[in-house]
Every structure is written in C-alpha cells, then in structure tokens.
Image: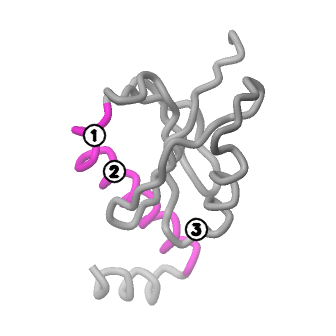
C-alpha cells in the first residue's frame, strides 16, 4: 500500500493522491465494515467525510460519519463527546462512539431528520 501511495503521489500529484485514496478508504469501509451496520442511505458527502444513515442493533437508526484518519482530530471529538455526555437536551445531537476501521474514523451519532 505504501509503495502504491508513493507512486500515485509521484506521478499524479497531491490532489490526485487525496482523491484516489479517499475513494479507496470509503470503499474499504463499505466492503469490510458493513457487516456491523446496515447502511440505509447516503446522507451527504463533503470534502472531508461521508455521512450515512445506518441501522445498528444496539442503537437503532443513527448516522455514521466516515472520515479519513488524516482529517480526524481525536481531541476535538473527545471534547464534543464530553460536552454531550449525559445531556438530556433534545436539541443537542448526541455522539455514541468513535471507532477506527483501517484508515477511516467512524463517528456514530444521533440521526436528526428534521422531518424532511
């Protein structure tokens, strides 16, 4: 994998490197981690992450934010988790957990559909 990364970076430049490996990481998530989740649909895609509506047995229907480990900041996530932990305010989105799968960080959080 490292040799493949170096070759893409050398021949195509950094932007191509980022785009190619972002797709590889999302595909890894979809192929190897889906047995733990039932993916219902894609909620959104951004420059740093993809968000899926998933069903997980212990939580029900939730959102799973999948981001490259290079874009993930553990301290930022930990702060958000501690701020929402034990909070009963229904207007604050709650984080359930964060797990690393390969090169991806997966954040499980409440799904808020806003009736749309």
Residue at the image point whose x is 23% and y is 50% from the top: 32
Label 3 residue SS = helix
Q: CA distance from mark 3 to mark 2?
A: 19 Å
Q: Quadrant of residue 54?
A: top left
The C terminus: image quadrant: top right
The magenta stretch spans residue 21: yes
Dot 1 corresponds to which residue?
34
| Numbered circle sitting on residue 2 | none
Q: Nearer the viewer, residue 3 or 25?
A: 25
Find the magenta span and give its range.
14-37
The N terminus: image quadrant: bottom left
Q: Main secondary structure of the magenta part?
A: helix
Say left or right for 96 vs 33: right
Say left or right for 104 vs 84: left
| Numbered circle sitting on residue 29 | 2
Dot 3 corresponds to which residue?
74
């Amino acid at each position: 994998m490292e040799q493949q990364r170096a070759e893409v970076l050398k021949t195509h430049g950094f932007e191509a490197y980022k785009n190619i490996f972002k797709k590889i990481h999302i595909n890894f998530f979809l192929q190897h981690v889906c047995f733990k989740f039932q993916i219902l649909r894609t909620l959104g895609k951004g420059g740093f992450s993809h968000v899926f509506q998933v069903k997980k047995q212990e939580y029900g229907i939730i959102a799973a934010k999948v981001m490259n480990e290079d874009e993930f900041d553990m301290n930022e996530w930990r702060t958000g988790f501690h701020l929402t932990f034990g909070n009963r305010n229904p207007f604050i989105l709650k984080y359930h957990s964060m797990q690393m799968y390969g090169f991806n960080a997966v954040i499980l959080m409440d799904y808020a559909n806003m009736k749309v």
